[in-house]
């Protein structure tokens, strides 16, 4: 539907994310990045309780990413 080269609607989700991060208000970016980092820390702690070893966590995350690439 949208041309990937289109300035407004094109590009990958990752590119759009970085465009927003680099051009948004710094205070908002800091607020949401801090919020996201807190969520990541909590999720990692929960995964440690389930999988134990840090190596096992990374393996589980990679496996999930591969097995659920369409959803991600």
Image (cartoon, rainbow, N blue to C red):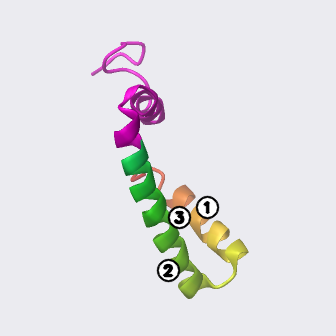
Which numbered marker is on residue 31? none
| Closer to the eye: label 2 or 3 | 2
20 vs 34: above or below? above
The residue at the far left in this view is: 1
The residue at the far right in this view is: 55
1 and 3 marks in contact (CB < 8 Å): yes
Give the extent of the magenta segment.
1-29
Q: Decide whether residue 5 is among the magenta residues.
A: yes
Residue in the picture at 51% in, 68% down: 41
Q: Which residue is mark 2?
A: 46
66 vs 47: above or below? above
17 vs 72: above or below? above
Spatial CA span between label 1 and label 2? 16 Å
User: Nearest the camera: 50 or 32?
Assistant: 32
Residue in the picture at 43% in, 65% down: 39
Q: Decide whether residue 43 is among the magenta residues.
A: no
| Closer to the eye: label 1 or 2 | 2
Task: Please tell me whether mark 1 sits on a helix, a strand or a loop.
Answer: helix
The residue at the far top in this view is: 6
Spatial CA span between label 2 and label 3? 16 Å
Residue in the picture at 54% in, 72% down: 44
Q: Residue 70 placed where, x, y %?
A: 42, 50
Q: Residue 34 placed where, x, y %?
A: 44, 55
Q: Which residue is mark 1?
A: 62
Q: Which residue is mark 3?
A: 64
């Amino acid at each position: 539907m949208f041309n990937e080269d289109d300035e407004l609607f094109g590009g990958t989700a990752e590119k759009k994310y970085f465009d927003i991060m680099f051009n948004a208000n710094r205070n908002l970016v800091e607020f949401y990045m801090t919020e996201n980092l807190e969520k990541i820390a909590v999720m990692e702690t929960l995964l440690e309780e389930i999988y134990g070893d840090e190596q096992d966590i990374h393996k589980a995350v990679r496996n999930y990413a591969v097995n659920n690439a369409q959803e991600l």
